[in-house]
Image (spheres, rainbow, N blue to C red):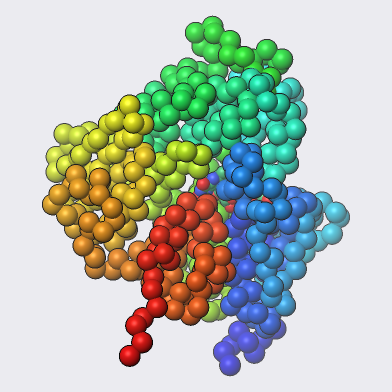
Amino acid sequence: MNTAQRTSPRRIVVVGNGMVGARFAEETARLDPAGDRVRVSVVGAERHPAYNRVLLSGVLAGDYGPDQIRLPAPGGAGITVRTGVAATALDARRRVLSLDDGTHLTYDELVLATGARAALPPVPGVRAPDGGPGEGVHTLRDLEDCQHLLSQTRPGAPVVVLGGGVLGLEAARGLVGRGARVSVVESAPWIMCRQIDQGAARVLADSYAAVGVAVHARRSAARWIPGTGLEVDDGTVLPGDALVVAAGVRANTELAARAGIVVDHGVVVDDGLATSDPRVHAVGDCAQHPGGGAGLVQPGWEQAAVLARRLTGSAPHASYTGARPLTRLKAEGIELTAFGRVHEDDDAPGLETLTISDRHGGRYAKLAVRRERVVGAVLLGFPEAAATLSQLYDTGAPVPSDRLALLQGPPTTVPEAQGAAEAPVCRCNAVSRADIEKAWLDGARTREAVAERTRATTGCGGCVRDVGALLSGMRPAPVG
Ligand SMILES: Cc1cc2nc3c(=O)[nH]c(=O)nc-3n(C[C@H](O)[C@H](O)[C@H](O)COP(=O)(O)OP(=O)(O)OC[C@H]3O[C@@H](n4cnc5c(N)ncnc54)[C@H](O)[C@@H]3O)c2cc1C
């Protein structure tokens, strides 16, 4: 019996029942099912049970109903979850959290998992006098936003999406699929400019035009005119019954800041996910770690797992060291994966690039190689190459000499790299091919069964095809 088991359970309070707060509770329940070491109280401002926020784009598109995106409820004996209750004040010296129902919780350790909210740019008409969305203006951060937007959008109605990043483009694709007439306005020179290069953006904008979405890059919003549309900086008014603002997020840091905890654009944390107060921790979109990770679920889930190991005493020195983001656009009929350094000048010393641009076919690929290793790629319409290249990127294995075959060929053109079996297939949940093979050997023969055992495919859903391909290639070992 270790020391933690001999003493009474530590009281952990989690603020936020979103994707990362809920995962933290699930991880602690897994590590301490009887609640011998920790008692966890989760409070969440949203009235819904925890759900997969990443799949809201799919709810908007009609791929999922709200009940289909629920996250599993943590089953441990030591976990309680209260929904529809917000934390209003933190007294970090006395270790007391005040809630908006008038009650208080005392804690030994506090976990901030308050996430982020949609930012509303200071464009006339976009913000109401109270700071919330103006008339006809919508954000897309939670289930209520999504349901409200859907209730206000009729087939044939014009909608303007402000922001041509991943979220804006996913929303635009979902809305056009529902019959809306959609325009996207992006002030940067090209859409998804943080993740992809200009050549890819050109082909992507063509793909959007082909499904009926007009993309206006290099255009800033000048004024939202309710009932009319969005006026942009050249004086054009894009018709819109609704304006969907997808122009970035702000971390919810107010609770921490008012308690005197160090906050920058997020709550500042170290590798142990502790804030400037060692009893207060922060994970997910509200946290700011030097290695990044805010804004994506995979780093948040990794942080949740690390912190659960630390606070249950299972691995008191576990650490989070940073993120290696990979972006997949969740838009029907468009296969886009991007990661690493794709913006560097093609003539940068030591950098080798290979680019294929097929505007007619709606395909684009850029591969960036340095010292025989993949350092970045943008793959639009090359799903098999995306799987292969992300694996090479993750394992750091040398790139085969025929780069073109790598982009064009099926995954089998790459020799088995050292460590390839350990490379993540499901990045959101850090599930490797070896994990999936093990699940298969243990009897999981369908994607659903594999998901149940390993959690693969239960994050953004971008690995569904890869997991399916792996399963279809598996055969029982010959007898004898
Ligand atoms: C439409 C959409 C699509 C996305 N797609 C992707 C994707 O494809 N891939 C990807 O990696 N990421 C994606 N993301 C981002 C991803 O959802 C976030 O990174 C993730 O949800 C972060 O989890 P979190 O728990 O930190 O924050 P959240 O999930 O935002 O949860 C925070 C919770 O805390 C609650 N809260 C806040 N303050 C308080 C308080 N004072 N008291 C009590 N509760 C409080 C909030 O109500 C909320 O429920 C997407 C996001 C959206 C909105």
Who's the residue at 19% across and 54% down the image?
A: 399
* Image vertical order of residue 149 relative to residue 367, above or below: above
Tally of numbered tags: 0
Quadrant the C terminus occupies: bottom left
Q: Is residue 10 visible?
A: no
Residue 447 at x, y percent in the picture: 52, 64
- x and y percentages locating residue 391 in the rendered image: 32, 57
Question: At 69% from the left edge and 80% from the top edge, which residue is drawn?
Answer: 35
Please give left or right for residue 16 compared with residue 219 in the image.
right
Quarter of the N terminus within the rendering: bottom right
**Closer to us: 359 or 39:** 359
Residue 101 can be seen in this image: yes
Q: Is residue 147 above or below residue 397?
A: above
Q: Nearer the viewer, residue 317 or 402?
A: 402
Q: Quadrant of residue 349?
A: top left
Measuring from the top left, give residue 396's x and y in whole percent.
25, 59
Q: Nearer the viewer, residue 438 or 94?
A: 438
Judge by depth and name the residue closer to the eye, 407 or 13: 407
Q: Residue at x 75, y 68 (%)?
A: 80
- Look at 46% across and 74% down and name the residue there: 440
Outermost residue, front side: 479
> Left or right of 240: which side holds 304?
left
Residue with the most extreme bottom position: 1
Residue 75 in percent (x, y) is at 69, 73
